[in-house]
Amino acid sequence: MMTEQVEKLTPEDGKSLDIEAQNIEQLKQLFPDVFREGKVDFEVLKAVLGEHIEDADERYNFTWHGKNKARQLAQTPSTGTLRPCKEESVNWDTTQNLFIEGDNLEVLKLLQKSYNKKVKMIYIDPPYNTGKDFVYKDDFQNNLANYKEITSQVDKDGFNKSNNPETSGKYHTDWLNMIYPRLKLARNLLKDDGIIFISIDDHEAKNLIQVCDEVFGVENFIEQFIWKSGRTSSSVYTREHEYIIAYAKNTNILNHIKYSGPDSKITDRAIKKIGVKNPASEIKFKQGIRFEGEDKVFPSVFGDKEVIEITQGIFECKDGKLANDVTVKAGWTMKNQIESWLSGQETYDTKGQKVTEFFFKTNGVLQYVKERGTEHPKTIINDYTTKQGGIEVGAILSEGVFDYPKPTGLIQFLMKIVSEDEIVMDFFAGSGSTAHAVLKQNQEDEKNRKFITVQLPEPINSSEKAAHSYCKEKGLSPKISSLTQKRIFEVCKTYPDAGFKSFKLDTSNIKPWDATFDTVEDMVDQSVDSIKAKRSEYDVLFEILLKYGLDLTYPISEHDIKGKRVFDVAFGSLIVCLDNKITNETIVGIGELKKELDSESTRVVIKDAGYEDSCEKLNAIETLKQYGITDVKCI
């Protein structure tokens, strides 16, 4: 039988990454002698660790009711999947951005294999636990089923039943049980030199820091920024600020953080196009307006250099005094010297002085270039307010659709650390400010950051009339995620080549994977198609990508091989055929495709019920071996 020849995707393959099993395996690698019949002998482990064991009865410990279950919840694999929504996406075939609708706990689990240590920066704006903003009620037994219920669970007045009133005896406990497993999962996704920023206010700031100390380590605390949000609240004093808590994955390898200042009208690419032709050896200025404040065109970044465009005779001397007649000498006129300096190499003028600045003129525009000094981000952030965020959302959607949305400028300020081609993640996407900020910053500094945003399809309360009215006008489902996605969709129109792939959290596409883990041993009857009704080949294809740990934005090509639809992912790294009545001619075609793509290693997945007959099943594995394909599984 074919089941003896071709390895089947089992119920274990249907789960997301099993973090608990992974931790045990890592412990085995470090301390193989502490295991007895597959179990950890804690007495032996204590002996191995020696004086590093803390066994005092009285010691500082941050805990709460349900903490152990919250920890287990983070380690319990998900059996769900992410279903692609191509029709709701923008530039599906080329974009590397993701918008995911679903419970972020389950989504974070599903992304563990594909995005482990790939995210450079995480920014989240979780519920502040004010009493009416809390909708995350996790279920230790079956969080995926629980998610289905919560997303439609509203009372007669349209308010979500999962609110967390301050009168609740578990007011802080429920919030801690929500945030703890999500942060543990998020940490796995961060690169070793990655950073997480978390917005919060006084309701949970102290608890959040203690949770982060445990999840990320006290030594990886970076800063507690004070953000003057402009949002006021009444208490004994008028509160006008919130906090942004920052932690690194590992401060020992964290790149030096510096803030590069406001953005310039001259981009990096513009500098490259302008070049350094005809540098002026001597430029004279007459007395004019002080070169500061609103009259200043701020610098952009070119390596460690600043570039300032001077459109009029405006110049400020180094000592801050304005001279009547200022003369600046460049020190040399050779183009290769300037290019060497711009590329980051130390350069010296004709007098042997190290060059830190010079002027040049091109197309009638005078340019002043100087070395950029190191500047750390300030711990008090003044320049961005929720009012600005509201104006941004109002201009794209409608005024009042979101209360106190985060301004893109705030996230751009934090994003200065994220270099080209890095991933920025936000799993409490809300109004979509993070995705907007990524696209905006990419446009301004011409980098290629990518975003992954996740938003719960939380029903909009009936009291939120502006949001309800907008959804009705635009034909959108009345839920927060619809508004999030709509904003990103509209923003993409304003930036060339911008886009995103849209996905929705759902149960698995494969029937056996839905069974209880303790009872399922193998696939169902081979004569029955294991794929659920009303699930497309694309649905199944992306579930396979998740199970194999492949990036959801890898290029996918479709091929017609002997009348059958065959997908190849990442230029032959994975080949999938989910068609029916597969013959050996199709199998040979798959082998030839692998040969044509010249893939170093290829994995193949074929629908088990799709073979023409049992003989074709038996021949498939041997045929593929002839093409060097040994990793073959069937669904």
Image (cartoon, grey):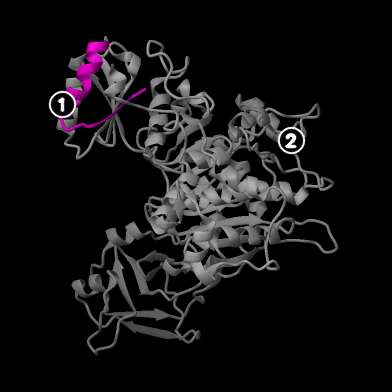
Q: Considering depth in this image, is 356 or 500 the residue closer to the camera?
A: 500
Q: In what quadrant of the picture does the C terminus appear?
A: top left
Disc 1 is placed on an element classified as helix
Q: Considering depth in this image, is 315 or 139 the residue closer to the camera?
A: 139
Q: Where is residue 409 in the image (x, y as percent from the top left)?
A: 55, 56
Instruction: Give the answer, above or below, for where 389 lies relative to 539.
Output: below
Circle 1 crowding by C-alpha within 10 Å: few under 14, some 14–19, many from 20: some
Q: Are marks 1 and 2 in contact (CB under 8 Å)?
A: no
Whether residue 404 appears in magenta in the rendering, the answer is no
Left-right relation of 339 to 164? left
Q: Name the residue under label 2.
A: 464
- Residue found 59% across the figure and 37% down from its top: 103
Q: Considering depth in this image, is 605 or 251 the residue closer to the camera?
A: 605
Report, in whole angstroms, how far the alpha carbon at label 1 lies from the one at label 2. 58 Å
**Three-letter code for the amino acid on which mark 2 is drawn:** Glu
The quarter of the picture where residue 330 lies is: bottom left
Disc 2 is placed on an element classified as loop
Instruction: Give the answer, above or below, for where 134 lies relative to 623.
Output: below
Whether residue 630 appears in magenta in the rendering, the answer is yes
The quarter of the picture where residue 612 lies is: top left
Circle 2 crowding by C-alpha within 10 Å: few under 14, some 14–19, many from 20: some
Task: Say whether disc 1 or disc 2 marks the residue closer to the N-terminus.
Answer: 2
Q: Position of residue 159 (x, y in %)?
A: 77, 33
Q: Where is residue 399 in the image (x, y as percent from the top left)?
A: 67, 40
Q: What label sits on residue 592 in the rendered view?
A: 1
Instruction: Give the answer, above or below, for where 133 lies relative to 470.
Output: below
Q: Where is residue 262 in the image (x, y as percent from the top left)?
A: 50, 64
Task: Look at the image and give the residue range highlighted in magenta.
Answer: 614-635
**Three-letter code for the amino acid on which mark 1 is drawn:** Glu
Looking at the image, can residue 100 be seen? yes
Looking at the image, can residue 381 be seen? no
